[in-house]
Amino acid sequence: MTDSLSAQEFKANYDEAAVPSYTLPDPLVAADGKPIDSAEGWREVRRPELLELFRSKMYGRAPGRPADVRYELEESSQQAFGGAATRKQVTIHLTKQANGPRLRLLLYVPNKRTGPAPAFLGLNFSGNQVVCRDPAIQLTDRWVREGEATDGNRATDASRGSQTENWMVERVIERGYALATVYYGDIEPDYEEGWRRGVRSVFPVDGKAKATPAAQPITKFRDDDWGAIAAWAWGLSRVLDYLETDGDIDARRVAVIGHSRLGKTALWAAANDERFALCVSNNSGEGGAAISRRRFGETVWRINTSFPHWFCTAYKQYNNREDDLPFDQHELVALIAPRPVYIASASEDQWADPKGEFLSAVNAELVYALLGKTGLGVTAPPPVDKPVGETIGYHLRTGEHAVLPFDWEQYLNFADRHLRAN
Ligand code: GTR
């Protein structure tokens, strides 16, 4: 972990009484001060304006879709989980070069289905082999964070299935959804210099519709060039490009899901790429669903200091200056409207500011309403373990910072309501 600050050096505020007073930017007032009062005004004026602000000031700009992708089916079997699912392992080559950047997709599709399956797509933290105990999953050969089931920065067989209960793959299949996952380190390894071994070293941000590799090695970034979160989100869109070509998947019903830093990533992916039909942000916290102006738990300064590579350089100017941000995170949620989005917090995860995450859901409501939807539909935080909401879902689960079976059950119920209703 590139966490260069020890906890002692930063005193996080966990006292609600010490949260400063603040005014949230109104998502329905344009930069020129004019009110936005129609769906068209949102689509044509305000949504592009907000996207541009988040791109240029926070996550950074990403290139377009690569000009030369190639999909290689490495392995498949219809006998996964005792015949309940078909497993596919597909390499997504992002350039023409055989040794160029590539993503390894692990896909399970339920065998019991009447047509192309809706799917959950999420990046994983430690290699595809951690998501369940299927011995056929390729062990990642990429850099992984050193831990119990690694040999230095290499994953070992001991890591197989270690996050089974965080992924619930068999349950997802049983409920009729496909599960697609890629190791986030395939896109970019998560440390400050990790970009040198990831897609940001290959594709320049040049504003062209089709991304092609740089002629010269990339050596530095401009203030608004993509950070790692934008790169991971871009990778999710590349997986969706593949899913659009796979006849077993209904690419119009793909839910993008992520936990923690990857929850921030899922939100940004869904904000940018309207092909994602639904978004789940699990404990995404600072830089995700939590309101930055609250300065509760992790703050802008702290996240930019611990993880200098996550956001674009321009974001650093807001260190300890949250009130100067031309947006707040409820507007990130609003960028997903009118599509369904689920925000989940955990009671012991105060670092991620559960109340701030809830308030983003509340304050995105205006935009959902303008687009003819009920968002959260409530303004008071619900009791623990009681999901609320309509097109915006929310719950505060009892317990720690993690995606747990309780969370998955709520996401599956939410997806049933939104992706299965005809
Ligand atoms: C923490 C970071 C959080 C969150 C978390 C995670 O150290 O401060 O913003 O992203 O890591 O991703 O697990």
Image (spheres, rainbow, N blue to C red):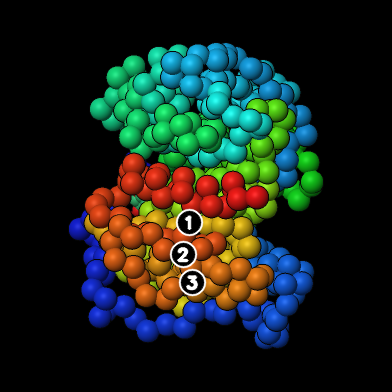
Where residue 331 sits: x, y (%)?
A: 56, 68
Q: CA distance from mark 2 to mark 1?
A: 9 Å
Q: Which residue is mark 1?
A: 342
Q: Disc 3 beta carbon < 8 A from ligand 1?
A: no
In this rendering, the answer to whether 212 lies above or below 370 is above
Tell me the quarter of the picture where residue 7 sits: bottom left
Residue ID for mark 2:
389
Dot 3: within a 10 Å radius of its alpha carbon, few (fewer than 14), some, or many (20 or more) residues?
Answer: some
Q: Can you give x and y, in whole percent of width and height, for residue 329 in the image? A: 50, 66
Q: Residues within 10 Å of mark 2 (few under 14, many from 20)?
A: many
Q: What is the three-letter code of the residue carrying label 3?
A: Gly
Q: Does the CB distance between marks 1 and 3 fall below 8 Å?
A: no
Task: Name the secondary structure under disc 3.
Answer: loop
Task: Give the percent coordinates (x, y) of residue 44.
Answer: 77, 69
Depth order, front residue of 90/117: 117
User: Cβ–Cβ below 8 Å for labels 3 and 2?
Assistant: yes
Mark 2 or mark 1, earlier in chain: 1
Q: CA distance from mark 1 to mark 3?
A: 13 Å
Q: Amino acid at mark 1?
A: Tyr
Where's residue 180, x and y in %? 54, 32
The residue where tag 3 is placed is 377
Residue at horizontal 65%, vertical 75%?
Answer: 370
